[in-house]
Every structure is written in structure tokens, then in C-alpha cells.
Image: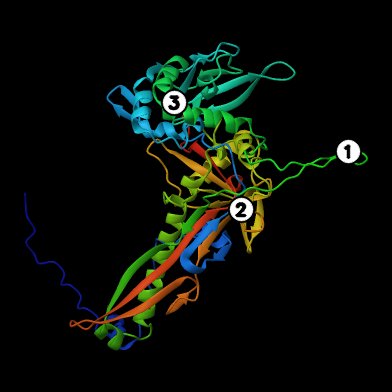
Amino acid sequence: MTVDSSPGPEAAPAAPQQSLSTSAARNLTNTTKSAPQMQEITSRWLLRMLPWVETKGGVYRVNRRLRHTVGDGCIEFVQEGATVRVIPRELGELALLRGFDDVSALTALAARCEQRDFTAGEVIVERGSPADRIHLIAHGRIRQIGEGKYGGETSLAVLADGGHFGENALLDPDARYDYTATAETSGTLLTLSRADFATVRDSVPGLQAHVAEFAAAAQRRQNKHGEAEIAMSAGHVGEADLPGAFVDYELEPREYELSVAQTILRVHTRVSDLYNGPMNQLEEQLRLTIEALRERQEYELVNNREFGLLHNADFKQRIQTHSGPPTPDDMDDLLCRRRGTKLFLAHPRTIAAIGRGFNAYGLYPDHVDLGGQSVPAWRGVPILPCNKIPITKEQTSSIIAMRTGEKNQGVIGLWQTGLPDEVEPGLSARFMGINEQAIVSYLVSTYYSAAVLVPDALGVMENVQIARRRD
């Protein structure tokens, strides 16, 4: 094989540069810059929609009419392997035991609770059968089914983790179940029989007195909300004797103290002196810090255990979905529990699940104009996004419905304005000094809380399935 060793054609010389290069020209130009961006910023609809009430003294007291009936709380359990125990103090969430704080007696009752595991489709109790025990649901979903007025079956309620039923069986020897309770999923519950409850009650004088007081309170005249009834007469003729009445108040009304979110903003004097053009460094640092504080404020208003909406919804205002994903029927159930519902709040992924649930019924949420922005709505009530509502590892979340405003006896936000060095209503940035390293410090604070004026102002739909179902 012959190899051609002759030299190839010579490379053409590079053309000489005829003008100034762009890289060199950039050294003589000004760069157009954006303000510092922040991905954490959200729409914060909750902060925008809550009516904010001035709270002088840092405390807001909610005065209500006296209520005789309390309880119906959510009960917590302890799991040790396959064994489940009820926390003794959690029995105080039952209406019968609310306010009873004898730990030894509650421990004795908790020790007598018997565990029962159930499977999906299993009938827990039959309608018409004698009711001789209370059932505490540790895990799982149970549907109560009753008989309709015109025959057929009607779904009365869906109970889930922490719920209970059959409490009247502990005191009434003639009690019977007026519904059938059927398990929708597998799970575990604990039962306490009337005989075991009576054994502990008879051995503890304090419990006997508490139960007697509860029975007496149940006999007092009250309205359907448990408030002391205001006696009156209507439809009478002539000179009938009119009943006397007065409105009794709660003796120990709840007080909401303003909470606080704070941080210390630090800026070096060299930065604020030399690098303030075209943007003021201190102003930009303060702007982003305020945005972060407002995000934290909204998170606390939703999740704080003292005043957060998810933890302050009355247990009678908490409902479960009937099948997992949100449906129009579920949204109606949540909507009908209060007058004048102002808004729904849901995680953006939950709103997507609501759309899928509506589409399955051939429906689509309508839209309403809210401050110039079109938002989805149901029955004219806007459904607003709030990514502070948590999503569990089981891909479930919650939907919040609320009525707002003091005049409407709704949910209100609490703040105090007129603070020293206030930069926004209820938010201040106070100069703290310059240290030996020439760093300027500012204390940035915001004070806030939320109050539910009457229980039905706030409702929550829990355990809403938001994951897509496999076809």
C-alpha cells in the first residue's frame, strides 16, 4: 500500500479583527440588573383575606354564651408494635369526662379498654343491637349507615383516626345503636364496656360526682348548639305570664395572646456605604426579610398548635370525605355547616384533586373575580391556594372553610399597629446598634394571631386524598 506523504494545503490565515470585540466592549457598559429574587414568596391569600383587628395590650378575649355541652374531641393513642393503648389523659376529650383530671382514675379506665382489629367491610355494630360499650378508633375509617325516612339506607357520618362512637352506652343501660357501623378500611379500635366503666366509677368518688354533674347538665334546657337556652314565649293570646330570661356568659372566656416572629438582620457598613447603587442594599435586605417573615406568619396561622386554624377547628366542624378524593358532595357537606362561608383554603395540589373529582361528575368549578384575579370557586365561594396546609406521607391533606369578620362572628386576624420603627402594619425594624466589626443590626418583628369567634365559623375537611388513583 502506498502512503501519500506530500504536504497538504496550508491553512488559510485568520482574518484580522476589524472592530472592537463584545467582551471588551462590556467593560465599558452598565449591566442591567434585577432586584434580588426569592422563590419562597407565595400569594399569601390567608393574610390578604383575613380581617385584621387591632389588639391593644397584646390580648384578645373571646366572650361567648355559656355552653353546657363540651367534648367530642379527638383521642390520641400510643402504638407499641401491634399493641395499641389509649393515652389516659386523652379520655378527657370525651364529653362525659371533659374536665375530669384524676389521672389515676383515667389510667384505670384506659387499662380496661380492649383492642379490636377489624378488616375492610367488617360490620362493627348492627343497627338496633344493644349498645353496651364505647368504641375509640385508633386507625382506619368507619362509616355509619342509618335508615332513611322513606326506606333505604343513608350515610350518616364517616369517622377516622381519633374518632369515637357509642358514648351514650356508658350511662344508659337501655341504649341501642340507631345506625350500622361498617369498616371502609382495615384498622384498630379500642372498646370500653359499660360494666368496666361502672366498676371504676363506683370505686372513685370524684368520678361519681363528675358523672352526676354531667347528667344534671344534660337535663338543663339548652339549644342545639349546647348554649344555655333563653326562655321566651311565642304565639300566646291574651295576658299570658311571660317567662323571665337572662343570657349567661362563659366564666372563663378564652384569651388569644399575640404571637411573634422575629429575626436579626445584619448588614456590614461597608456594603451599605459603598454598594448602594443602583439599589439600596439595606432596603433590599429588609424587603426579602419581611417576605420571609410574612411567609412564616401565614404558616403559623395555619399550623400553630395554640391558635392555628387546623388545630382550632371545633371537633364537630371536622368532617371526613366519603370516598377519599374530594367530590362535589364533600364540598357541599363542608359548605353547609356554616352560614356565609367566605372562602375555602386548600393546598394547590388539593385544588387540582378537587378539579379531578369534579370532572369525574361531569362538573367544573366556576370562577369568581377576587381583587381583579380570577380564582376557582364552588357555589360562589372562592377556593384559594395555601401551600402552608401540610400534605402527609400518605398523600392526604385538608380543606379549610371559614366565615370571616367580627360582625359575622367569624375568623379574624389579630395584630397591633403603631409599633416603634414600624415599616409595615404590625411589623417593625428597630435599629440595634453597630458592633466592633462594623456590622449594623436591626431587629425585625411582626406580631399576630387569629381568633375563632364562634365554633361554626371554621370547618375542616380532613384526610382528603390528593394522589391520583391508578386506573
Q: Nearer the viewer, mark 2 or mark 1?
A: 1
Number of the label disc, if any, that sits on residue 410? 2
| Relative vertical location of residue 273 with respect to residue 319 in this rendering, above or below | below
| Residue at screen point 50% across, 28% down | 211
Q: Looking at numbered disc 2 in the image, what kind of residue is underneath it?
A: Gly
Q: Nearer the viewer, mark 3 or mark 1?
A: 1
> Is residue 436 in view?
yes
Q: Position of residue 345 (x, y in %)?
A: 54, 49
The image quadrant that residue 86 belongs to is top left
Query: What residue sits right under mark 3 in the picture?
Result: 137
Q: Are marks 2 and 1 in contact (CB under 8 Å)?
A: no
Residues under labels 3 and 1: Cα distance?
A: 49 Å
Horizontal side of 435 relative to 128 (left or right) equals left
Colouring? rainbow
Q: Position of residue 171 (x, y in %)?
A: 53, 21
Q: Position of residue 285 (x, y in %)?
A: 35, 75
Q: Earlier in the sequence, mark 3 or mark 2?
A: 3
Element type at mark 3: strand
Give neighbour class at mark 2: few <14, some 14-19, many 20+ (Cα, 10 Å). many
Horizontal side of 344 relative to 347 (left or right) equals right
| Relative vertical location of residue 23 with respect to residue 166 in this rendering, above or below | below
> Is residue 35 in view?
no
Q: Looking at numbered disc 1 in the image, what kind of residue is underneath it?
A: His
Residues under labels 3 and 2: Cα distance?
A: 31 Å
Pick out the residue farthest to the top. 129
Q: Position of residue 396 (x, y in %)?
A: 45, 38
Q: Are marks 3 and 2 in contact (CB under 8 Å)?
A: no
Q: Looking at numbered disc 3 in the image, what kind of residue is underneath it?
A: Ile
Element type at mark 2: loop
Query: What residue sits right under mark 1 in the picture?
Result: 236
